[in-house]
Image (cartoon, grey):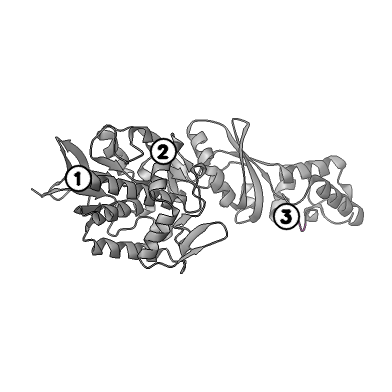
């Protein structure tokens, strides 16, 4: 029989690593278990591989949960300054960009993973990777962690930091959800967040890889205007991506899961007013009457997008501009400024950056991250029903919740 461990942290992603470091700093012996052969989780791919650690603008409104207030104690316990100080103490030089996002000065996410691994070694945290956990059972005052091919581990306390379902190519499986449910917890059904949206609009194949900067997107749920975002837009096969889409995707994905009708409306040219567009098109008609309609929007939109818009309006773009009617001009302007796109789904979990939903936070103490149902069971990171916007908010949640879970477990040992 393996010895009884004071604390076992399951999951060596950012939240699990922070939990282990925090507890070990307070003198508790920690065993960190990871199913992959290396630790770090999604750290190497965060911030497009640049390592977006956190954000200057930490506010509750950038987080989503069935109980949004839940994030506040953790974010207060380990805030922006704490995060920067922690990584600077590890020897990392930081850079803050114009959007308040914080990166390693080298813009290399891999250095974060290496520094955390070094800190685990310094604190003598025992790390076992490449393991397969079958089940977690409560045995009186202890936990039994049942393994596939090796003897069980036994723990006085456990921190579940197993992540969610996003990025299965990085071996995200959602195992922690199953273990949490068997221990008595309930889930908010997980759904992809920070993910591309899909559509079944005809002729959408004409648009792949077209990118527009600074468009305005409005999200409609059951035909009601929900929210508006501004950012880049990228047309992909059968869907749309980009910063503006990611900003809306959480609400869209959740609504789709609930069976609601979802659509987005796009102002493709927010820098031009209706009056300016009207004047521009009338001058084209007057000055270039023999020019083909396909070139009508030349200089305003990419040619393939212009072609798509005219085709969707059943306008023959091989006709000369001089034959365009007033009604056609109004229809084109309406389509440019109110480009309507019904949303039928999201891309798969493979393309999601984070998971929405998870273990309901109503069953977890926000001041300690300890289960309200099972004493000495703690949660940290993406396994919980907490997800953040793009910009470092999800990694900050990993640091903050991991810190609070590790601190609480150490103080409770």
Badge 1 crowding class, 10 Å Cα cut-off, few under 14, some 14 to 19, many 20 or more, is few
In the rendered view, tell whether residue 133 sits above or below residue 190. Answer: below
Residue identified by numbered label 3 = 301
Q: Residue at x 72, y 47 (%)?
A: 309
- Residue range (magenta): 298-302
User: From the viewer's perspective, is the residue at label 1 or at label 3 nearer?
Assistant: 1
Percent coordinates x, y for residue 148 in the rendering: 18, 47
User: From the viewer's perspective, is the residue at label 2 or at label 3 nearer?
Assistant: 2
Question: Left or right: where does residue 70 sit relative to residue 334?
Answer: left
Percent coordinates x, y for residue 83 in the rendering: 40, 56
Q: Does the magenta stretch include residue 98?
A: no
| C-alpha gap between disc 2 and disc 3 | 44 Å
Q: How many marks?
A: 3
Q: Are marks 2 and 3 in contact (CB under 8 Å)?
A: no
Question: Left or right: where does residue 248 sit relative to residue 115?
Answer: right
* Residue 360 appears anywhere in the view: no
In the rendered view, tell whether residue 229 sits above or below residue 105. Answer: above
Residue identified by numbered label 2 = 70
Q: Residue at x 33, y 36 (%)?
A: 364
| Numbered circle sitting on residue 142 | none
Of mark 1 and mark 3, the one earlier in the sequence is 3
| C-alpha gap between disc 1 and disc 3 | 63 Å
In what element is the residue under mark 2? helix
Task: Please tell me which residue lies in front, 386 or 279.
Answer: 386
* Residue 137 appears anywhere in the view: yes
Question: Which residue, as the protein is rendered here, is positioned at the far left?
Answer: 1
Residue identified by numbered label 1 = 413
Badge 3 crowding class, 10 Å Cα cut-off, few under 14, some 14 to 19, many 20 or more, is some
Q: Do the residues labelled 1 and 2 touch (CB within 8 Å)?
A: no
Badge 2 crowding class, 10 Å Cα cut-off, few under 14, some 14 to 19, many 20 or more, is many
């Amino acid at each position: 029989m393996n010895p009884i461990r004071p604390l076992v942290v399951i999951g060596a992603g950012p939240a699990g690593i922070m939990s282990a470091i925090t507890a070990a700093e307070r003198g508790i012996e920690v065993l960190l278990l990871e199913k992959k052969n290396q630790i770090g989780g999604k750290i190497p791919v965060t911030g497009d591989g640049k390592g977006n650690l956190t954000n200057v603008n930490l506010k509750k409104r950038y987080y989503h949960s069935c109980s949004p207030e839940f994030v506040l104690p953790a974010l207060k316990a380990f805030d922006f300054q704490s995060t920067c100080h922690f990584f600077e103490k590890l020897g990392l030089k930081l850079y803050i960009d114009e959007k308040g996002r914080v990166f390693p000065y080298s813009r290399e996410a891999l250095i974060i993973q290496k520094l955390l691994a070094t800190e685990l070694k310094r604190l003598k945290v025992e790390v076992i990777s490449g393991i397969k956990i079958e089940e977690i059972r409560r045995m009186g005052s202890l936990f039994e962690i049942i393994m596939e091919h090796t003897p069980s581990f036994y723990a006085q306390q456990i921190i579940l930091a197993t992540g969610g379902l996003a990025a299965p190519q990085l071996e995200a499986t959602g195992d922690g959800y199953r273990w949490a449910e068997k221990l008595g917890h309930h889930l908010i059904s997980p759904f992809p967040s920070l993910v591309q949206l899909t559509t079944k609009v005809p002729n959408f194949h004409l648009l792949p890889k077209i990118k527009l900067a600074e468009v305005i997107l409005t999200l409609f749920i059951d035909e009601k205007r929900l929210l508006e975002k501004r950012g880049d837009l990228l047309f992909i096969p059968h869907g749309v991506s980009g910063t503006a889409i990611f900003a809306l995707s959480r609400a869209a994905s959740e609504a789709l899961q609930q069976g609601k009708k979802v659509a987005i409306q796009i102002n493709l040219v927010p820098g031009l007013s209706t009056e300016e567009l009207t004047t521009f098109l009338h001058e084209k008609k007057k000055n270039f009457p023999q020019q083909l309609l396909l070139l009508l929007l030349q200089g305003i939109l990419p040619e393939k997008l212009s072609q798509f818009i005219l085709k969707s309006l059943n306008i023959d773009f091989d006709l000369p501009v001089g034959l365009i009617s007033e009604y056609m001009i109004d229809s084109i302007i309406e389509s440019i400024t109110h480009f309507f796109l019904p949303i039928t789904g999201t891309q798969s979990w493979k393309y999601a950056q984070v998971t929405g939903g998870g273990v309901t936070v109503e069953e977890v103490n926000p001041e300690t991250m300890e289960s309200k149902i099972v004493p000495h069971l703690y949660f940290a990171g993406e396994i919980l029903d907490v997800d953040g916007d793009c910009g470092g908010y999800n990694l900050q949640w990993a640091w903050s919740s991991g810190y609070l879970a590790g601190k609480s477990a150490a103080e409770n040992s």
